[in-house]
């Protein structure tokens, strides 16, 4: 059992010693199987080693939130501009055309809504997950939430077992307890726990000191977009995360709630894949928006 009186913050993250990617271009994947690597290569651009994931899984707990009233009208047109689509089985089945060839990251847990106490999630059935033909599976861990941490951790570990059975990558979506600071210490803790429990991808929030979060996590880290920000702020956040070593973004509201969602996802893509600076990306966004 860990000694809670002697938890010392890490201070040697080896920031000048990059992870070994000599056998495969993504961090932490050298020893993985062919199937998992193949699926990861669908999600992460092989030239940049990064991804722009489009998250629209919000409906399972938020209902028809702004921008997701009609996924067939708001998300389906964006699909070709994303490297990967992250959504729930219902929306994918009913509103994403089956001829879509973009990889899908299936939200594989479900539970309570924003109207009640959140995070009391359960997993979908194993056959149901595989039937959806996902390139990745995703579930949340609620680190530091006394009521739900154990349940979500067990869910996640079970999902990794299922993913390993079929060589399907699993993305850990990190959440931290309401009493925990939203800083690199706790997001680093949550991200490391996800990786230690077998995640192939970790999704977490950008914060100051994010280079340490990335360094201590042995698999690719993508950032959540979070609440809607002004376009320049969302582009700056993506740029800073990439500068810190993030392997991409998994954005939702900062894309589909934008006044020009197609222009925004293209601008985010330019930041992630081309290293475009935020002001340049904003000009790209405004130009594409003007073109309609």
Image (spheres, rainbow, N blue to C red):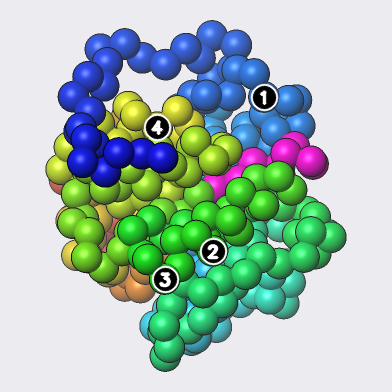
Q: Quadrant of the C terminus?
A: bottom left
Q: Are marks 2 and 3 in contact (CB under 8 Å)?
A: no
Mark toward the start of the polypeptide (2 vs 4): 2
Give the residue pinned by disc 3. 147
The picture places residue 163, in percent across and down from the top left corner, at 71, 45
Mark toward the start of the polypeptide (1 vs 3): 1
Q: What's drawn in magenta, residue-wise?
A: 164-171
In three-dimensional space, the C-alpha distance between marks 2 and 4, rounded to whole angstroms, equals 22 Å
Give the residue pinned by disc 4. 217
Looking at the rendered structure, which numbered label has been put on residue 136?
none
The picture places residue 93, in percent across and down from the top left corner, at 73, 72
Front: mark 2 or 4: 2
Give the residue pinned by disc 1. 32
Query: Residue 241's image quarter?
Result: top left
In three-dimensional space, the C-alpha distance between marks 2 and 3, rounded to whole angstroms, equals 8 Å
Front: mark 4 or 3: 3
Identify the secondary structure beneath mark 4: loop
Q: Is residue 280 visible?
A: no
Mark toward the start of the polypeptide (1 vs 2): 1
Mark toward the start of the polypeptide (4 vs 3): 3
Looking at the rendered structure, which numbered label has been put on residue 151?
2
Q: Residue at x 37, y 47 (%)?
A: 190
| Residue 288 left/right relative to 24 | left
The picture places residue 280, in percent across and down from the top left corner, at 20, 43
Identify the secondary structure beneath mark 1: loop
In three-dimensional space, the C-alpha distance between marks 4 and 1, rounded to whole angstroms, equals 16 Å
């Amino acid at each position: 059992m860990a000694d809670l009186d002697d938890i010392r913050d890490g201070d040697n993250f080896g920031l000048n010693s990059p992870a070994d990617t000599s056998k495969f271009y993504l961090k932490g994947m050298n020893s993985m199987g062919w199937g998992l690597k193949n699926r990861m290569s669908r999600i992460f651009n092989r030239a940049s080693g990064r991804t722009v994931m489009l998250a629209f899984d919000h409906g399972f707990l938020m209902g028809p939130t702004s921008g997701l009233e009609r996924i067939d009208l708001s998300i389906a047109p964006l699909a070709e501009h994303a490297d990967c689509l992250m959504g729930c089985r219902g929306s994918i089945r009913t509103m994403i055309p089956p001829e879509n060839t973009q990889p899908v990251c299936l939200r594989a847990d479900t539970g309570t809504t924003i109207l009640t106490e959140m995070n009391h999630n359960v997993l979908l059935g194993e056959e149901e997950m595989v039937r959806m033909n996902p390139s990745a599976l995703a579930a949340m861990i609620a680190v530091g939430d006394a009521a739900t941490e154990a349940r979500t951790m067990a869910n996640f570990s079970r999902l990794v077992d299922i993913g390993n059975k079929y060589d399907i990558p699993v993305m850990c979506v990190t959440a931290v307890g309401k009493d925990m600071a939203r800083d690199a210490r706790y997001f680093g803790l949550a991200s490391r726990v996800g990786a230690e429990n077998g995640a192939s991808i970790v999704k977490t929030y950008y914060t100051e000191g994010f280079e340490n979060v990335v360094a201590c996590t042995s698999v690719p880290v993508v950032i959540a977009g979070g609440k809607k920000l002004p376009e320049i702020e969302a582009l700056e956040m993506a740029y800073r995360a990439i500068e810190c070593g993030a392997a991409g973004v998994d954005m939702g509201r900062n894309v589909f709630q934008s006044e020009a969602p197609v222009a925004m996802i293209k601008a985010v893509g330019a930041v992630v894949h081309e290293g475009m600076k935020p002001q340049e990306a904003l000009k790209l966004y405004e130009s594409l928006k003007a073109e309609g």
